Amino acid sequence: MIRFLLLALIMANVAWAEPLDKIIAVVNNEVLLESELDSMEQTVRQQLRQRDAAVPPSDVLRKQVLERLIVQRVQIQNASRVGVRVGDDALNAALRQIADNNKLSLREFRNALESDGFDFTDFRESIREEMIISRLRKSQVEDRVIVSDREIDTYLATQAVQGNAEVAYHLAHILISIREAAEPEDVQNGNAKLAKIQRLLDEGSDFSEVAAGYSDGQNALEGGDLGWRKQGELPSLFSDAVPKLTVGQVSDPLRSGSGLHLVKLLDKKSEETHLVKQTLASHILIKTNELTTDNDAEKRLNILRERVLNGDDFAELARAHSDDTGSAIEDGSLGWSSPGAMVPEFSKEMDALDAGEVSGVFKSRFGWHLIKVYDRREQNMAEEFQRTKARQQIRQRKISEDLESWLRELRDEAYVEYRDL
């Protein structure tokens, strides 16, 4: 009996000293704990202060952080189902990169985090979750986006007519989420929320503060900031409205399958013309194999180099001796090449030459080379560059649109039960 009473007293003291963590929500078959919400809220508050951004009232911020936590948890659950993982080696490499970016060793970075009140183990796992979510989004959204040549042709033709291909817009965004098949009551609540937001804006409330407090968008806690977007990167819903806005103006409500949107034009700029430096060069390649050693290849090219310097025609020697059959039939010509087209070791040697100059003999991952540079030029907005840029902008726009729809679908399909906050 005495042993039982002592045990009961010990257990009571433990329970009093270490209260149980409170469940604040159930997401599918998992619980979200108050400690998780507190930790994320602390992180968000610190991020907002670092950006000198307005911090919403505590109750509003807490609800927004909880919603972000729910969406993160749903994504992690989805990643587990489809087999997306991040191992310790990849995680450690990412942590070292973060430390390097802050010009700290990993130990110094850990000490800095802990001195700011963050648990390094928790931080480490949060980075793992971010990496998992990034890989999940890549596999489920980004890798499935296809940009056709016809889309690029249409995009370039439209930009030519509009004459604003180089205009970039800095945007902020508020989303009032209303599902396409929403009940009348949900539509009514959404419209009431929109009316409240518009009233706050009309009364002079800061757009970023209103977005942080009321937006259902993924960028809500960043004040709805979407960053800089070029015309081709704008979501289709915004593409007509944004160019008509003046800086500081908020759009009329825009309706999509995700709900109602308000967009504010924070700033806009015309970007400078892009000049591409190109090089016209030829080369002779000698590959190594079982019969040709590195020493053999280097000697052969040094002999050919001497012949070139003594007046022999580089093109003839390339046709006769180069192992790069594709360029050999073109007199060794590589055509006009843009930065990044060649492997780094080749580019380094080529970029050091003046027009008409011949390189020394050097080795790359493909074998041994001799280069002659014939000419250099600056190409203003080459067609290839325009098409590459157009492809990137269209792809980014489609990713943005598809990601929003995918996240909304995941969130709508999830079972979420809220507990008292």
Image (tube, rainbow, N blue to C red):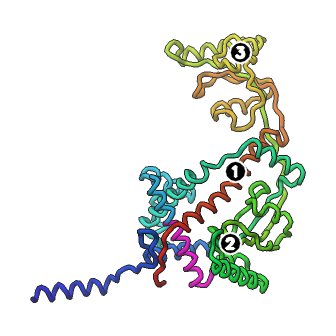
Q: Position of residue 132 (x, y in %)?
A: 50, 56
Front residue of 411/396: it is 411
**Which residue shows up at 71% across the image and 84% down it?**
196
Q: Which residue is mark 1?
A: 395
Q: Amino acid at mark 2?
A: Leu
Mark 2, other Cα within 10 Å: few <14 / some 14–19 / many ≥20 = many
- Our reading of the magenta stretch's main secondary structure is helix
Of the two numbered discs 1 and 3 in the rendering, the one whose residue sits closer to the viewer: 1
Q: Amino acid at mark 1?
A: Arg
The numbered mark at residue 175 is 2
The answer for how far apart the CA atoms under marks 3 and 2 are is: 62 Å
For label 2, the SS is: strand
Q: Quadrant of residue 374?
A: top right
- Magenta span of residues: 54-73
**Which residue shows up at 52% across the image and 17% down it?**
289
Q: Which residue is mark 3?
A: 318
**Which residue shows up at 65% across the image and 81% down it?**
189
Q: Earlier in the sequence, mark 1 or mark 3?
A: 3
For label 1, the SS is: helix
